[in-house]
């Protein structure tokens, strides 16, 4: 295995009710029938995985026009990406020392609007876009019908993209970097196991929005959970890999966890 580095890109902040993220967080009771709701700050991030022979971008963040009517009003009202306009993909790649032309492939962990909003940047380029089979099916089903989930926008991903379909439970990108199917949040969430000289990294992504999903095994709120059973099985898969490897675990939107890694591994 050659040297692999992981560079984290800060793509801005989303504000949302913690009850979306931790099931039952502000649930009322007889003694406290009207609990306070906590609106918390969450990170949107991407990563650049630099391998011996290729450079891979993990996710593409939100569309910069998210706050200007690009995201549907009900979605933006619940999940406000307040600084999306300040975080274009080009600018955030540049801040990390990369350009779009350096990217040999893109892994789309899933196609929700805060993860797939920059895919249009790769339309017509021929750059391979990796996505799980179940995710692509569900995204088009959701975006093109009144069923599924409202968190998919066809305008994010319905482009001339060089889709590379991931089937089954695992897919090796290159030696030391493999993708993991982690259904639960959506049918086709992808995580990753990455081996760097500074230690292993497990990308849990939106399988675990925050620490409490992982450590306390509290599921995502119902609005963010496609399947409770699949979510729990995927959680155990990540936990077993952590036990085997001692890897750092990177969550989907936990700002404190993101900051603790200081930009990445071996950067």
Image (tube, rainbow, N blue to C red):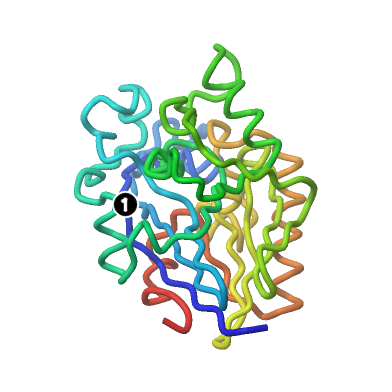
Residue 3 spot, x, y in % from top left: 57, 84
Q: Secondary structure at mark 1?
A: helix
Front residue (pair 52, 62): 52
Residue at which label 1 appears = 89
Location of residue 228 with respect to 252 vertically, above or below: above
In-image side of 203 versus 63 (left or right): right
Front residue (pair 95, 26): 95
Q: Quadrant of the C terminus?
A: bottom left
Front residue (pair 125, 66): 125
How many residues crowd around disc 1 within 10 Å: few (fewer than 14), some, or many (20 or more)?
many
Total number of numbered labels?
A: 1
Location of residue 171 with respect to 258 vertically, above or below: above
Q: Quadrant of residue 17?
A: top left
Determine the residue positioned at 59% across, 15% down.
147
Determine the residue positioned at 44% across, 67% down.
257
Residue 94 spot, x, y in % from top left: 27, 64
Residue farthest toward the top in the current orientation of the protein:
146
Residue 225 spot, x, y in % from top left: 61, 36
Q: Quadrant of the N terminus?
A: bottom right
Determine the residue positioned at 59% across, 73% down.
201
Residue 136 spot, x, y in % from top left: 62, 34
Q: Quadrant of residue 258?
A: bottom left
Location of residue 30 with respect to 52 vertically, above or below: above
In-image side of 146 versus 175 (left or right): left
Determine the residue positioned at 62% across, 38% down.
186
Location of residue 57 with respect to 164 vertically, above or below: below
Residue farthest toward the bottom in the current orientation of the protein:
197
């Amino acid at each position: 295995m050659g040297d692999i580095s992981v560079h984290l890109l800060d793509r801005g902040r989303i504000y949302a009710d913690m009850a979306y993220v931790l099931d039952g967080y502000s649930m009322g009771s007889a003694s406290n029938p009207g609990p306070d709701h906590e609106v918390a700050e969450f990170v949107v991030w991407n990563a650049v995985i630099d391998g011996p022979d290729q450079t891979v971008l993990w996710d593409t963040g939100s569309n910069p026009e998210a706050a200007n009517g690009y995201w549907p009003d009900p979605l933006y009202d619940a999940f406000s990406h307040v600084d999306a306009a300040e975080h274009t993909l080009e600018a955030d790649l540049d801040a990390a020392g990369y350009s779009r032309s350096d990217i040999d492939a893109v892994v789309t962990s899933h196609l929700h609007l805060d993860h797939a909003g920059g895919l249009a940047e790769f339309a017509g380029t021929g750059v391979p876009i990796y996505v799980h089979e179940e995710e692509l099916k569900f995204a088009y089903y959701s975006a093109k019908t009144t069923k599924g989930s409202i968190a998919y926008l066809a305008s994010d991903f319905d482009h001339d993209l060089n889709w590379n379909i991931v089937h089954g439970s695992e897919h090796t990108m290159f030696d030391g970097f493999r993708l993991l199917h982690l259904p639960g949040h959506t049918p086709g969430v992808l995580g990753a196991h990455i081996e760097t000289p500074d230690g292993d990294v497990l990308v849990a992504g939106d399988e675990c929005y925050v620490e409490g999903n992982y450590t306390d095994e509290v599921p995502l709120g119902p609005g963010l959970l496609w399947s409770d059973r699949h979510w729990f099985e995927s959680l155990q898969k990540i936990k077993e890999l952590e036990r085997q490897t001692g890897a750092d675990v990177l969550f989907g939107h936990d700002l404190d966890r993101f900051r603790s890694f200081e930009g990445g591994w071996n950067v």
